[in-house]
Image (spheres, grey):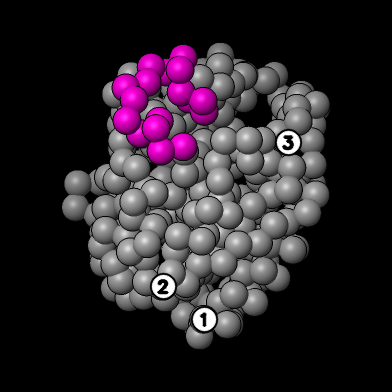
Amino acid sequence: MNQPEILSQNIGDAEVQYLYYPGDGPTVILLHATGFLPWLWHPLARSLAGEYRVLAPYFCDHRHAEPEEGLEWMLLADDLCRFCEGLGVERPLLAGHSMGATVMTLAEALHGPVARGMVLFEPIFLPGEIYQMDLTIDQHPLASKSIKRRNHWEDASEARDYLRSRALFRNWDDEMLDLYIRYGMVPGETGGLNLLCHPRREAALFMGSQKRDPWPLLPGIACPVLVVEGELSDNRHFIDLKKAASLIPSGRYRLVEGAGHLIPMEKPGETAALLREFFREVGG
């Protein structure tokens, strides 16, 4: 299947849009990183579809939040459970990136068993002491960067040149970059292109990350979990994912060589193979 259906699901007090790829096997749910979008799972979902039924929800704009207050990731974890319940999905296979990985970790730990198994790409498990602090936007290690993100380009060509010049996007797969520009940007009010997920909304999501400490919850996760880290990720300086994997009873750790924080966007083929291997191993 080349293109997914674009559907939506009511979760009680909000509507969640998602990409749907039909398949005859178990359900896989793919949850994106902060500030990104489900279309960045498209090359992977396309390769899994058929063997699996794949859903990729958009968790950026279904709830309003300002950066100063933040959007709690615990609420997003509740939303993930409501999303599954509304669609009648039981014990799916989960894969999440960054924020998405953390949200599904919270869902599994506090509402589990939710998943049959989880693959967590670069989850945002901040140092424990950060969750005890009342940080401002300027003090938050991730929100302080995201709120300053550039948010206007004259056209797709300028956007592509700019993104390729930035370390965060430099090693992206070509199709992934095209998907980000096509679906992650929208026409600006005065022309040109703006980000679909506004930098203030992205900052609000990051500010919500500090509301619930995931570290004490990790030993209570019962399902098999694979924690995946990029060898070149800047987050390795302050997030200890080897330790996180060791705290999960059925947790394992894998390092992806030559990749940064954005593993699925930089190495989609390797990522898809990793997912398929893990899902088959846990009974998917």
Q: Residue at x 56, y 17 (%)?
A: 148
Residue occupying the far left of the picture: 12
Spatial CA span between label 2 and label 1: 9 Å
Instruction: From the image, tell me which residue sits under label 1.
Output: 282
Q: Position of residue 192 (x, y in %)?
A: 64, 21
Q: Secondary structure at mark 1?
A: loop
Spatial CA span between label 1 and label 3: 32 Å
Instruction: From the image, tell me which residue sits under label 3.
Output: 169
Residue situated in front as seen by the camera: 242 or 203: 242
In the picture, measured across the screen, residue 167 lies left or right of residue 189, that is right
Q: Position of residue 58 (x, y in %)?
A: 44, 48
Instruction: From the image, tell me which residue sits under label 2.
Output: 223
Query: Bounds of the magenta span?
Result: 127-143
Instruction: Name the magenta segment's main secondary structure.
Output: loop
- From the image, state whether disc 1 or disc 3 is nearer to you: 1
Specify whether residue 66 is in view.
no
In the picture, measured across the screen, residue 129 lies left or right of residue 243, that is left
Please tell me which of labels 3 and 2 falls first in the chain.
3
Placement of 249 over or under 262, stated as above or below: below
Please tell me which of labels 1 and 3 falls first in the chain.
3
